[in-house]
Image (cartoon, rainbow, N blue to C red):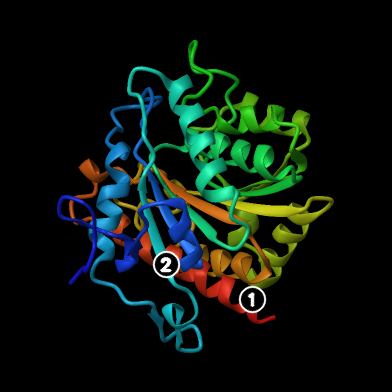
């Protein structure tokens, strides 16, 4: 049973400590924060990811930090987890919401160098203001491992610069991001457009397709190659994961994208990246209205635990 609640009947993620103010961040090693933002729907009838942080927290209440398959590590013997609650959003203004996310992460996340942050979305537009906050607060050059079926690099969606299919176009423009160290990983499927791949190439970003991963002989070597590309000539590496990197068989709470990764492949990559060193992460686009048994919401707990297990290994050297 949860001891603390973020709001209503919603427990802190993975039964972590509720963080009431910035000072309490000094009492934890990692912190979760929710970004319950959903902008314009860019494809089909897929909506409801603004409820993702709540659904993922509710699903997480049944789990411990023990992972017998990873050398029997108990993550919470090594890491104390906190939950900052949700970032304030303004449904009527994407621009104001992006500013809120940047200012929140600058003040509460990136100003504390000792805490590993985990953002729960929300749609993928949140990644841009999170990384913008990192660049503005710490002045570091950032590489990005972007795990996704899609490039999400449209220049605009209509007049909207901050739609869920645009964040990496904004990140290409951000001075603190080294585009050659921005690795679009697991890209697949005909919902991508030719101009998206062309734009990524022109910007200098790297594309690794799902076939590159599925057909490699050694997924651990592939993880190392991806990380080496992302970490070249930068200070830190950030990890951003969209749920539709997974095949829809493993992601009922996401769009119907076939030919994605298995949960084993995704978790292995996430764990390896955590071991090699990441400054933070986000997991976005779980759609509770399509996730009848909340399987995708439950998977979020395992993804975060695998990342944290990697962080533990990294800290142990």
**Percent x, y for residue 70?**
49, 83
Closer to the camera, 129 or 103? 103
**Where residue 18 sits in the image (x, y, percent)?**
33, 60
Measured from the top left, where is residue 136 in percent x and y? 67, 37
Residue at the image position 49 percent from the left and 50 percent from the top: 282
| Residue 303 placement, left or right of 311 | left
| Total marks in image | 2
Which residue is under mark 2?
A: 81
Residue lying at the far left of the rendered structure: 9
- Residue position marked by numbered label 1 in the rendering: 315
In this rendering, is residue 291 above or below 169? below
Q: Residues within 10 Å of mark 1 (few under 14, many from 20)?
A: few
Give the quadrant of the N terminus.
bottom left
Query: Residue 122 sits in which quadrant?
Result: top left
| Residue in view at x 74 percent, y 62 percent | 225
User: Disc 2 or 1, which lies upstream in sequence?
Assistant: 2
- Secondary structure beneath label 1: helix
Is disc 2 surrounded by few (<14), some (14 to 19) or many (20+) residues within 10 Å?
Answer: many
């Amino acid at each position: 049973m949860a001891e603390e609640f973020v709001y209503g009947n919603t427990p802190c993620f993975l039964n972590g400590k509720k963080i009431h103010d910035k000072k309490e961040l000094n009492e934890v090693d990692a912190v979760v924060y929710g970004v319950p933002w959903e902008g314009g729907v860019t494809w089909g009838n897929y909506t409801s990811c603004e409820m993702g942080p709540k659904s993922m927290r509710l699903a997480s209440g049944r789990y411990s930090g023990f992972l017998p398959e990873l050398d029997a590590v108990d993550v919470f013997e090594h890491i104390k987890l906190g939950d900052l609650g949700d970032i304030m959003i303004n449904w009527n203004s994407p621009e104001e919401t992006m500013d809120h996310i940047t200012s929140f992460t600058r003040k509460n996340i990136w100003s504390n160098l000792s805490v590993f942050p985990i953002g729960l979305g929300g749609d993928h537009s949140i990644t841009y203001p999170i990384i913008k906050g990192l660049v503005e607060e710490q002045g570091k050059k950032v590489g990005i491992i972007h795990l996704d079926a899609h490039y999400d690099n449209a220049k605009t969606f209509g007049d909207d610069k901050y739609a869920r299919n645009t964040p990496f176009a904004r990140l290409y423009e951000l001075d603190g991001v080294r585009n050659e160290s921005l690795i679009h990983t697991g890209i697949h499927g005909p919902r991508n457009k030719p101009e998206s791949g062309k734009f990524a190439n022109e910007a200098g970003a790297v594309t690794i397709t799902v076939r590159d991963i599925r057909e490699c002989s050694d997924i651990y070597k592939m993880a190392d190659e991806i990380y080496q590309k992302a970490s070249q000539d930068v200070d830190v590496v950030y990890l951003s994961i969209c749920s539709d990197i997974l095949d829809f068989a493993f992601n009922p709470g996401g769009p119907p994208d076939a030919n994605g990764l298995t949960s084993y492949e995704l978790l292995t990559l996430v764990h390896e990246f955590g071991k090699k060193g990441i400054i933070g992460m986000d997991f976005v686009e779980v759609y509770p209205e399509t996730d009848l048994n909340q399987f995708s919401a439950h998977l979020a707990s395992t993804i975060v635990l695998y990342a944290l297990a990697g962080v533990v290994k990294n800290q142990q050297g």
